Image (cartoon, rainbow, N blue to C red):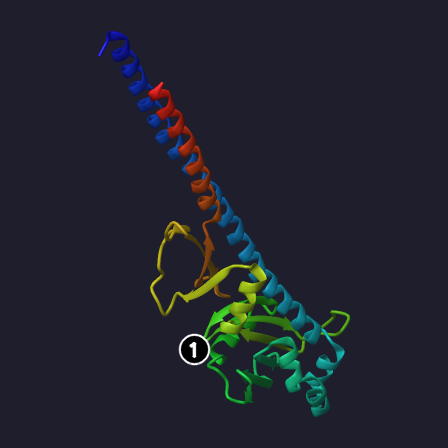
Amino acid sequence: MTLRKKTLWMVGTTLVGLLILLLTVSSTILLEGFVKLEKLEVEKNIIRLNNIFANELERLFIIAGDYAAWDDTYDYMQTHDEEYITANMVDSTFENLSLNLIMLLDLNGKVVFEKHRHKQEFDAKPFQFYEHIDALTKNTPKSQGLILLPNEIMLLATYPIITSEEEGPSRGTLIMGYFLNETEIDRISNLAQLSITVQRFDQSLVETNQHIQIIDKYNISGFTTINDVYKQPAILLKLTMPRNIFQQGLSSLRYVSIFVLAFAIISACL
């Protein structure tokens, strides 16, 4: 082999090596950029999921306010007229508003009226809710949040019973609530266009302490904690997303890699 050919071979080999090194470094940097982008997307969806839950609680709070700040309810707390119950606390009220609980309490926290729905059945058996009444009504007659019951997670709202003009004095407290069951989780998942699962803090170990977790090259998850009405961690929401951004990045890098390698081979041959 002549000196000229040796020189060209060395230059070509060096060029190929440099191109491969450049490709490796740039691929790593670009992939890290795509990972950052998809994590930002997960962060946005976590915020969106928190907002959806906040909106659900606000919706329930508004409904509770509509019934509590109402002359008919205000009068019932004094007269105990059954016509009010017959007209307003019917089964269809629960079904139309997706409720599982309505309670009317007097100023001493005594239950004046209560109705419960579990699945599609109505009965007078409470679901171990009474232990929360004092805490919910003692200092904050207006509240919204969730509580952990032994077998259920409940979103609820409380509102003072006053006149339609939002005037007092208050004659008690109205409590409304509904279960965060599989049906509701599916509804929220569809609303958010995300795959969502719920873990209770009191019944299972939290899967991870990470805010965002890469599951594999196809899926990524984000986590957010929802506190209960006592300001304690109650549930962990997990959202799972396909890694579309990362996969698009991989696809783009494949094309770039093919181009660079082809260029390197042609350069070496020349």
For the C terminus, the image quarter is top left
Whether residue 81 sits left or right of residue 192 in the image: it is right
Q: Residue furthest top?
A: 3
For the N terminus, the image quarter is top left
Out of 163 and 122, give the one closest to the viewer.
Answer: 122
Q: Percent x, y for residue 211?
A: 42, 51
Identify the image quadrant of residue 15.
Answer: top left
Q: Secondary structure at mark 1?
A: loop
Out of 228 and 137, give the one closest to the viewer.
Answer: 228
Give the mark count: 1
Identify the image quadrant of residue 74.
Answer: bottom right
Query: Residue at left 56%, top 79%?
Result: 100
Identify the image quadrant of residue 19.
Answer: top left
Question: Pointer 1: what residue?
Answer: 151
Decide: is 264 above or below 135.
above
Whether residue 125 sits left or right of residue 83 in the image: it is left
Q: Percent x, y for residue 11?
A: 31, 15
User: What amino acid type is highlighted by mark number 1?
Assistant: Asn
Q: Percent x, y for residue 85?
A: 68, 88
Q: Percent x, y for residue 6?
A: 25, 12
Query: Residue at left 28%, top 8%?
Result: 4
Query: Residue at left 67%, top 71%?
Result: 63
